[in-house]
Amino acid sequence: MDQLCEDRYIDEDKVRQAQAYLVDSLSATRLSEIFKALSDPSRVRIISALTHTELCVYDLAAALGMSQSAVSHQLRSLREMRLVRYRKEGRHVYYQLDDEHIGDLFRRGLEHVEHS
């Protein structure tokens, strides 16, 4: 059952306190886009595979049991959202998480899901 305020009194101090921590619209939009990118199970699994090592598309496809083209498609989305980056070594392209924040975000979300 939702708990509502008893009357229409607005506690100005609490409103100011909430406003002090309120995220701005641009940051809220960017964050919602990251969560949207992580709303696909295939992309989450790619992130999980990249948490400890860099992998090429073929290695990712083999690890996830997906086609190379499906993995490439998902990686494109993750690159656009700056969740993964790549480096080239000769003819090979290796993917890794863009920075430690992505791994942290993944681990924290996983901890929440696994919390009993």
Image (cartoon, rainbow, N blue to C red):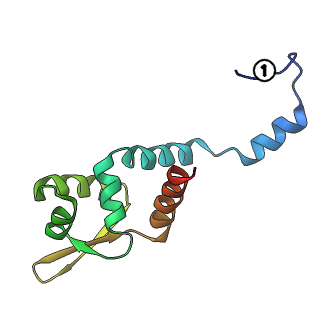
Percent coordinates x, y for residue 66 in the rendering: 16, 55
Task: Name the residue: 55% across, 52% down.
Answer: 112
User: Image quadrant of residue 1?
Assistant: top right
45 horizontally vs 56: left or right: right
72 horizontally vs 112: left or right: left
Percent coordinates x, y for residue 77 in the rendering: 28, 52
Task: Name the residue: 19% across, 52% down.
Answer: 73
Task: Name the residue: 50% across, 43% down.
Answer: 29
Specify the farthest residue to the top. Answer: 7
Percent coordinates x, y for residue 25 in the rendering: 58, 41
Specify the farthest residue to the bottom. Answer: 90
User: Image quadrant of residue 58?
Assistant: bottom left
Q: Nearer the viewer, residue 8 or 68?
A: 68
84 horizontally vs 19: left or right: left
Residue 5's place in the image compared with 76, above or below, is: above
Q: Nearer the viewer, residue 59 or 116?
A: 116
**Label 1: which secondary element:** loop
Q: Residues within 10 Å of mark 1 (few under 14, many from 20)?
A: few
95 horizontally vs 35: left or right: left
Residue 8's place in the image compared with 105, above or below, is: above
Percent coordinates x, y for residue 82 in the rendering: 37, 60
Which amino acid, mark 1? Leu
**Count of picture labels:** 1
Q: List the residue tagged with mark 1.
A: 4
Specify the farthest residue to the front. Answer: 116
